Image (cartoon, rainbow, N blue to C red):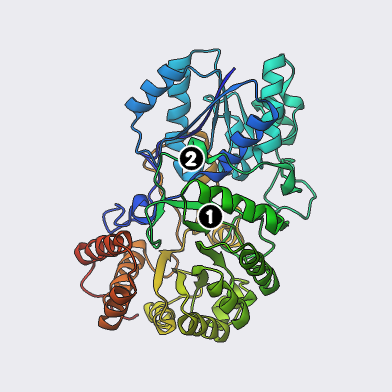
Amino acid sequence: MKILLLNPPDKETVQEFPDEEGNSYIDTEDFGFFPPLGLLYVLSSIEKERPHHEYFFKDAVAERCSYDKLEAYLKEVQPDIVGITSFTISLVDICRTGELVRKVCGDDVKICLGGHHPIAFPVEAAQLPQFDCIVVGEGEHAFVGLVDAWENNTDINKVFGVYTKEKMEHFKDKTIEDKRFLKSVSVPAAYVDDLTTIPIPNREYIRHIKYSSVVGVSSDLATIISTRGCPFLCTFCDVPYKKYRTRPVDDVLDEVEACMKMGYEEFHFYDDLFNIKAKKVIEFCDAVEARGLKFTWSFRGRANAVTEESLRRSKQAGCRMISFGVETGTNAGLKELKKGVTTEKFVKVFRWCREIGIVSLADFIIGFPFERTVKDIQTNLDFLISLDPDYAQIAVLMLLPNTPLYDEALEKGIVKPGVWEEFCLNPTPDFELSYWTEFHDLSTLVALQTAAYRKFYFRPKYILRSLLKTSSFYELKTKAKGGFKLFFSKIKASVTSE
């Protein structure tokens, strides 16, 4: 059989960063494109387990693939089975892609929906008419079982983690008692506890695509996952599977070496949490140095697990950049968000990064419930600027379903019950995301966000230091593009303190 794994186009994605007119002044592509690793893992797993099938992979997002081009590709390949990955904000494109596959390939083609969306909304996802079934959880083992069932004409409902509309009827209005999951997970989900049982992603399928990050140094980036899951309980985050699972360091570095042989030199560790403990990072650095590997790498980390020693060892082993979720600027706010860290620790960590020479990125959010006045927001933003990171990403808080903040917003009437479920059953491009608007309307929050970007990046001290630290033409080009974008963006003349 011909099996296609597909990352659908993103032509009608719900806007995450709207300006005053509802448009996005920071587009998705401004951040760069990362490979859809989850989809690649599924492909590599079934390719290894069932080598007798013919396999295809299409990343329509990174390849800027239009629907016309995707239609031509489907006509050429004529797959028997199509697996489509998903995020809920991309649901309009996902359903349109499913309809296109059915139109081109006929009624006999089998279409499965996987990715984040069926995990977040399994009941609604199973009812979408464009798909024969969904996979809830990680698909490496579930998809193999699904393909076997289709090949042998057996009941796909017996495959663990696979759900049809009929099977889902047995789980409506139920919850599962499993401490590995958030309470929002309502059906038994397929997850891989032993990460050594799955092969590394086969990047031959994507080697022709140049992936990159707006904060990277090259236009040819590889991403790697060394762990899965996050045990922390931040109130705004919807990572559903809390069990932290690690891969052996040697397996991770085998993958790094395989990528280096393919020509990759820059690596980003895309773990939800790379540095759960400083000891883990130091052991990783020991292994890198023992092999004599020279490569540039970065990761997303938590400041509470950082030590000065772990930063120094990381720098010695080739680490260029670490991004930290700072989120807000007071200890009271961090406590409400259950971040498990203090502002004093952030000050230390960002100072260490500056002294050691590791590029730092601070992720920040405005619009939390405890920011009742504009002055509250500005005070928190002043803390961000005082940290003086090399980069800052400033978001307006989105209220994501299956999070404590969303539940609180429902109780206060800030979000209407059922709006996401309605969208998931009937996705339309005009769907509006939810924000905490109890104290500030969205236009005020967006104006503050835009002004904060300008204030941070247009400091003369920052501009000079940034230019001096630029190490590649790609980095210079992305910085220039970002500067022009911010300079010409529309903002309100001023926002008066409340």
Label 2 residue SS:
helix
Query: Residue at the location (41% across, 44% down)?
Result: 431
Query: Residue at the location (79% across, 51% down)?
Result: 178
**Rendered location of residue 217, percent (x, y):** 38, 61
Q: Which residue in the structure is indicated by mark 2?
A: 423
Query: Residue at the location (32% across, 57% down)?
Result: 26
Q: Which residue in the structure is indicated by mark 1?
A: 400
Q: Of callouts 2 and 1, which one flags the residue occurring earlier in the amino acid sequence?
A: 1
Q: CA distance from mark 2 to mark 1?
A: 13 Å
In the picture shown, does residue 282 fall above or below 379? above
**Rendered location of residue 273, percent (x, y):** 61, 62
**Rendered location of residue 320, percent (x, y):** 47, 69
Camera-near label (2 vs 1) is: 1
Closest to the observer: 251 or 300? Answer: 251
Residue type of the residue flagged with mark 2? Phe
Label 1 residue SS:
loop
Q: Which mark is residue 386?
A: none
Is residue 177 visible from the viewing direction of this image? yes
Is residue 416 visible from the viewing direction of this image? no
Q: Residues within 10 Å of mark 2 (few under 14, many from 20)?
A: some
> What residue occupies the far front of the structure in this picture?
292
Which quarter of the figure is the N terminus placed in? top right
In contact (CB < 8 Å): disc 2 and disc 1: no
**Rendered location of residue 200, percent (x, y):** 63, 44
In the picture, measured across the screen, residue 72 lies left or right of residue 42, that is left
Closest to the observer: 386 or 307? Answer: 307
